[in-house]
Amino acid sequence: MLEKTYDPKAIEEKHYPRWEEAGTFAADVGSGAVPYTIMMPPPNVTGSLHIGHALTFSIQDFLIRYQRKAAKDVLWQPGTDHAGIATQMVVERQLAERQINRRDLGRDAFVEKVWEWKAESGGTIIHQLRSLGASADWPRERFTMDEGLSAAVRKVFVDLHKQGLIYRDKRLVNWDPKLRTAVSDLEVQQIEQKGKIWHFRYPIEGDEGRYVVVATTRPETMLGDTGVAVHPEDDRYRDIVGKHVILPLVGRRIPVVADEYSDPEKGTGAVKMTPAHDFNDFEVGRRHSLEMINIFDAGARVNENAPEPYQGLSREDARKKVVADMEALGLLEAVEDHANVVPHGDRSGVVIEPWLTDQWYCDAATLAKPAIEAVETGKTVFVPKNWENTYFEWMRNIQPWCISRQLWWGHRIPAWYGPDGTVFVEMSDADAKAAAEAHYGEAVDLIQDEDVLDTWFSSALWPFSTLGWPDKTPELDRYYPGDVLVTGFDIIFFWVARMMMMGIHFMDEVPFKTVYIHALVRDAKGAKMSKSKGNVMDPLDLIDKFGCDALRFTLAAMAAQGRDIKLAESRIEGYRNFATKLWNAARYAEMNGCALDPSFDPAACKQTVNRWIVGEVAATAEAVSVAFEAYRFNDAANVLYQFGWGTFCDWYLEFTKPILAAGGEDAAETKAATAWALGELLNMLSPLMPYLAEELWENLGGEGMLINRPWSKAPKDTSGAAEEMNWVVRLITEVRSIRSEMNVPAAAKIDLRLKEANDLSRARLNTHEDLVLKLARLGSIGIDDGEAPAGSVQSVLDEATIILPIADVIDISAERDRLTKDIAKTEAEIGKIDKKLSNPGFVAKAPEEVVEENRERLAEEQARRNKLAAALDRLAAV
RNA sequence: GGGCGCGUAGCUCAGCGGGAGAGCACUACGUUGACAUCGUAGGGGUCGCUGGUUCAAUCCCAGCCGCGCCCACCA
């Protein structure tokens, strides 16, 4: 017997281990079924579950559970990402609490500490995913730094290097002076700030008293200036091109060059060139062979390349001093307020410095070409499709990808340097030694590159590295390419694009056929949720409060495409109530002895109401199936909600109460049909609300576990039961409406029951007041004997043996007002439809069924109007 | 500067060429065996504004007004 109250926690704890132990989550490599693969985007090993995770992993679980029911051999490949910078920061912070610096510890000891940390608390998020109900194939869990995946990383690096697609280069990078590592363009956030723009006078050599004025937002960089650029067509500066200026404070003699980069409209038209600290200046500097002087150290303090008084100053202090000194020299011409965008590190939050270093680069442009083509030709499609534009835009303008990081936690770059600096890129230390020996003709000592790879480098290989690549495993053969990748748009560049590039390059096939991009969950103001803003909703709290099923169902209902999700707790509460409703419906079924009967044949029902519910189940199954296939989870949720609460609970269970009460053969059929319909509902619901569905299925006496049960194949209704029932529903609705509007006292409650007889249901009204009301209005509700199946309305009327004067029961004037209002409404409606139908264009061009529909509606409304008017007359006569 | 998205009931959101929808909130009435985490009924909207296309526009197009996001090297 089901408990009186629905307790989500109890059933969550009960069923998850059962599913897992029964192996229902496991892929079956040897199976003959069609495979269906989703690669789980590996969450950061440092992570803990937030609401965005809840959305993305719930959606994946919906698809996985649905496809499992569609008899596919599903693989949901789970795992975690080592998350280089994030993880290193976490462990460093912990060490700092104990006054330990990682540099004191040394590289090997530090990395050891990180592994220890990972072993202790790295599995948090995986456990949290289980409490979301995620049915991933957990024994296949991978970690990006597993030995197998690390080997894949080395192989990819070595192969790309041999192909010339990975190379070492000295150029400007985005340098994070706090973390002391290079970061990629994507890890830089442009933040608009209020700043100033300073106009400096640079004296022209050999032209006493004449200056060229340059404007800058970063005065401190002048210490590294090695030129001034003007536009070749700019008449103001034409005569000084080729001359030199004397850089104040430094005393360096630097050339004035003509370059198209300089925009006469901007600033003063003359730009100071700091090729070692500005991306644009770097390009100009290359074109004009300007000297590149690096004036900052790795912590962004002024180094020994600048004049002594500035050495050791921070960027901020150097700026103050430069401005003060220039002003003292009378070389500061103007200062203006200026809004400009300043690059910040997305992890460290400090200002990023363009810095000249040696780094490893990946030739992304070459790899991008086939990845662009794959989307153009539809080998991979984005859902919704408009994200393809975002993908194209970025891929077509892709820059070399800086893949080296000055960190300790990550995949160490498989490059070794010989005594003369010759580089050997090989799979292992031994291979490198052998290669070096071959090169030098003798064994030499090699030094491995200190850097590690960008975290996203290994993530890019996820779709095949997790399946055993480079070995030719059965898994790789069977589950690559994946069917769908589910993710938020915020990592299209970081991850999706790079998986496309690597997947196509190494597997000759796209990594997934569909990319489903879901919305981001935001707070009430539409801002991205983040811990620092304090606007996070903790999914675990929500699960605790409302249950996992309610949260999942809510996420499904709100996962409409193309709009960010601002989650309201009241929605979750509403869907929790839905779960409660179904729980109670199941209790009702149980109390009435409705149990699943394997011999029940839904196609063979005799009673209208049962034929009807069978048809409704079929229609719902079809609609939900279509919704899942189209990634329209909100449609699926809505259809199930309406069927479950509306059709099944409100109507079917109410309709059949009198039948069950009467007993006999009809009751037997109805009990079996009730159990069957409930079972099918649970089956369809189980991808979204797996726990509730499984529990109630078990209680209903269902065979096996619902998680494995095939999707509903209810027979469609062709008996016309739907039409008949629709009529009954309309009748009941009208009568209820009358009762309510007329403020009938409680004593006169209508007990409206429909009893299934040989023909159709009959409405039976129990109290004489109700009959009065009904007779007063029945003629006015647009239903007459001609429309109703034979005998129905008449049979109701036949029972109306006691008729009281209307005035005894109702307020005549209120009823008159109401009727008058109704008539006005009806006439307005008639006017609208009439206008439409008298439009020749409409009749000529609109689809025939639309015109016909409108004609029918017009007739209905007219009849209704007439009957309302007649009722008003009758009322006047009382 | 370029691109994308959003403005529908008090709130959170569906719908998207032919009769304006859901949940929550609100109002009235109703608890003697499924369910008050409930039932029945009801009130509430010129579907941001202005034009255009169309026989027909909340829906398509353009412009405008608000809001949000992404990308971009501009002194």
Image (tube, coloured by chain):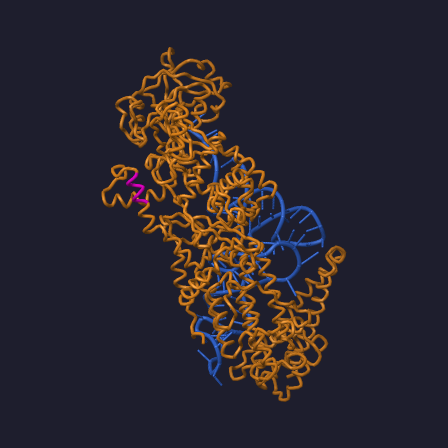
Q: Is residue A524 visible?
A: no
Residue A641 lies left or right of residue A403; in this view the side is right
Which quadrant of the figure has residue A440? top left
Q: Nearer the viewer, residue A761 or A438?
A: A438
Q: Which residues, given as a range, are shown in magenta?
A: A108-114
Which quadrant of the figure has residue B40? bottom right
Q: Is residue A346 visible?
A: yes
Q: Nearer the viewer, residue A592 or A878?
A: A592
Chain in blue in the render: B
Residue at image location 37% in from the left, 41% down from the top = A84
Residue positioned most to the left: A99
Q: Is residue A395 above or below residue A296?
A: below
User: Which quadrant is the C terminus of chain A positioned in?
Assistant: bottom right
User: Which quadrant is the N terminus of chain A positioned in?
Assistant: bottom left
Residue at image location 68% in from the left, 75% down from the top = A783
- Of helix, strand and loop, which mostly describes the magenta segment? helix
Residue at image location 39% in from the left, 58% down from the top = A540
Residue A654 image point, x, y percent: 56, 76
Residue at image location 39% in from the left, 63% down from the top = A545
Residue A332 lies left or right of residue A772; in this view the side is left
Chain A colour is: orange
Residue A502 image point, x, y percent: 50, 39
Whether A254 is among the magenta residues is no
